[in-house]
């Protein structure tokens, strides 16, 4: 018989991707106050779920956010014959022992960008796999060359057949790998494949983002031998097999940063519960440079801006630099700062799409080139009909709608469900007037 917790978990499963209301209506200018909790990290959940394909025993994952991206990854595992069940409100139990590569849902893989994370585990597990090109993303061109470089170094042969890749490796062998760029997902793919490779692998220029570290900790808990965690050089001594593990995901650094920006724009302090301050040093520094007050407490971060905000300069960089996923929320922050802020995102050429939507709302912004924008303020924002564009732009425009006077309607806002769990309900608890509409 299912427990009460399991029954509650089933009731709260996220809407299937592409279903449910797609439009958010926000009546802005409300005074928001209180505290908001940070969920587990989306960018840790998807690679860790993919890594369960390497395990010879079931795994229990805790603090898993209820997101459409997470559910899609679980569905891909289910298409392989794995068992993946919500056994708690934020707990998933995954058993991949019966997984069969022949039943892989290629359509689901193609529709989801983070399905690229399956490449390493599937190759290590089944030795031969055909994968379609993963789904694209409007934030810019994201080639998978770095992934292929890493897997070829481990002994894989890779052949492109139209929109598909054939990967083969009777046996993976440890190797010295120098990644051409600090690619988070390529680092994760190489690390997962190397965990079961024969011999020692050393990954140079590895990404060191918190979620890369979390994946390494999960693999080690299952019996992997990974050292150098948190540095740009990872050493992996391959093992014959991995067992299972119970693992609690880290808090979502990006969600916490998004809420911190909201706190700087609210009329009263916002207390963010469950954030990990160690992962937010540069984020808190930039908020303070903009004039916000940031206080680190036991298990929480409080953000307020009792004095006028001031302009800032921001450039995204690999961790521990400023995360690209937070430059858009800082863009809306810049509209309320005195002076001209410069935001530079060298990685993706499509990250500034949200700026046009802010301009519709009254922002004074000039896009210099695909990677740089100047935003002058403070300028009042007014409710408009706008579009969500992508995950981080969608969350940014929610903040803009809360700050704006009048009614803001965000079309295509369902993209927000990819990375923010029940955002409308959590903001409403702070006093926001926000609701989904058909």
Image (cartoon, helix red, strand yellow):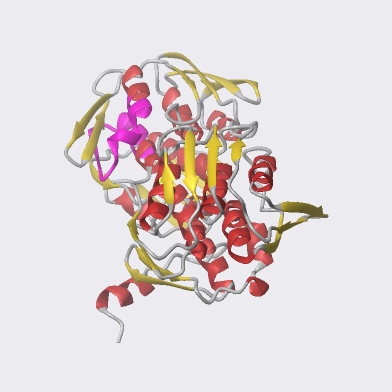
| Nearer the observer, 100 or 288 | 100
Is residue 249 positioned above or below 316 on the image? below
Instruction: Give yes or no for residue 262 being in the magenta stretch.
Output: yes
Is residue 303 positioned above or below 52 on the image? above
The magenta stretch spans which residues? 258-284
| Nearer the observer, 215 or 394 | 215
Residue at image position (56%, 45%) is: 185
Q: Is residue 432 left or right of residue 70?
A: left
Is residue 178 positioned above or below 78 on the image? above
Is residue 200 positioned above or below 360 on the image? below
Q: Is residue 68 visible?
A: no
Residue at image position (29%, 40%) is: 276
The image shows a total of numbered marks equal to: 0
Residue at image position (40%, 19%) is: 337
Q: Is residue 302 left or right of residue 358?
A: left
Q: Quadrant of the N terminus?
A: bottom left
Q: Position of residue 73 (x, y in %)?
A: 53, 61
Q: Which quadrant of the figure has residue 172?
A: bottom right
Q: Is residue 326 left or right of residue 264?
A: right
Q: Position of residue 342 (x, y in %)?
A: 51, 17
**Which residue is farthest top?**
339
Q: Position of residue 215 (x, y in %)?
A: 43, 49
**Which residue is farthest left?**
298
Q: Position of residue 399 (x, y in %)?
A: 41, 38
Instruction: Give yes or no for residue 90 being in the magenta stretch.
Output: no
């Amino acid at each position: 018989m299912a427990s009460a917790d399991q029954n509650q978990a089933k009731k709260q499963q996220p809407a299937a991707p592409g279903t449910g209301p797609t439009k958010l209506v926000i009546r802005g200018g409300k005074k928001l106050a209180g505290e908001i909790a940070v969920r587990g990290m989306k960018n840790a959940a998807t690679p860790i779920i993919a890594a369960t394909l390497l395990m010879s025993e079931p795994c229990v994952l805790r603090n898993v956010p209820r997101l459409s991206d997470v559910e899609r990854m679980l569905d891909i595992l289910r298409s392989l014959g794995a068992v993946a069940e919500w056994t708690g409100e934020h707990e998933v139990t995954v058993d991949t022992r019966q997984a069969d590569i022949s039943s892989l849902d290629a359509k689901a893989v193609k529709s989801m960008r983070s399905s690229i994370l399956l490449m390493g585990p599937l190759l290590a597990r089944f030795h031969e796999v055909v994968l379609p090109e993963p789904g694209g993303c409007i934030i810019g061109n994201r080639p998978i060359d770095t992934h292929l470089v890493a897997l070829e170094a481990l002994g894989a042969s890779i052949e492109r057949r139209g929109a598909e890749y054939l990967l083969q490796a009777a046996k993976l062998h440890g190797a010295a790998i120098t990644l051409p760029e600090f690619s988070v997902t390529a680092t994760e793919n190489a690390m997962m494949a190397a965990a079961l490779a024969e011999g020692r692998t050393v990954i140079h220029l590895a990404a060191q983002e918190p979620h890369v570290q979390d994946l390494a900790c999960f693999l080690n808990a299952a019996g992997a031998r990974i050292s150098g965690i948190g540095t740009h050089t990872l050493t992996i001594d391959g093992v014959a097999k991995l067992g299972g593990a119970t693992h609690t995901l880290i808090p979502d650094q990006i969600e916490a940063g998004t809420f911190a920006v909201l706190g700087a724009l609210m009329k009263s302090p916002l207390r963010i519960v469950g954030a990990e301050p160690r992962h937010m040093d540069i984020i808190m520094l930039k908020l303070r440079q903009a004039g916000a007050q940031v206080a680190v407490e036991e298990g929480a971060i409080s953000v307020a801006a009792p004095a006028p905000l001031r302009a800032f300069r921001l450039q995204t960089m690999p961790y521990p630099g400023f995360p690209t996923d937070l430059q858009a929320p800082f863009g809306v922050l810049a509209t309320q700062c005195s002076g001209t802020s410069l935001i530079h995102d060298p990685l993706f050429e499509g990250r500034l799409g949200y700026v046009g939507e802010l301009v519709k709302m009254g922002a004074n912004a000039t896009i210099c080139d695909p990677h740089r924008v100047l935003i002058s303020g403070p300028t009042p924002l007014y409710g408009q009909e706008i579009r969500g564009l992508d995950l981080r732009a969608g969350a940014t425009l929610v903040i803009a709608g809360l700050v704006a006077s009048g009614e803001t309607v965000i079309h295509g806002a369902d993209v927000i469900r990819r990375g923010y769990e029940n955002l409308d309900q959590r903001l409403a608890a702070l006093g926001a007037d926000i609701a989904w509409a058909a």
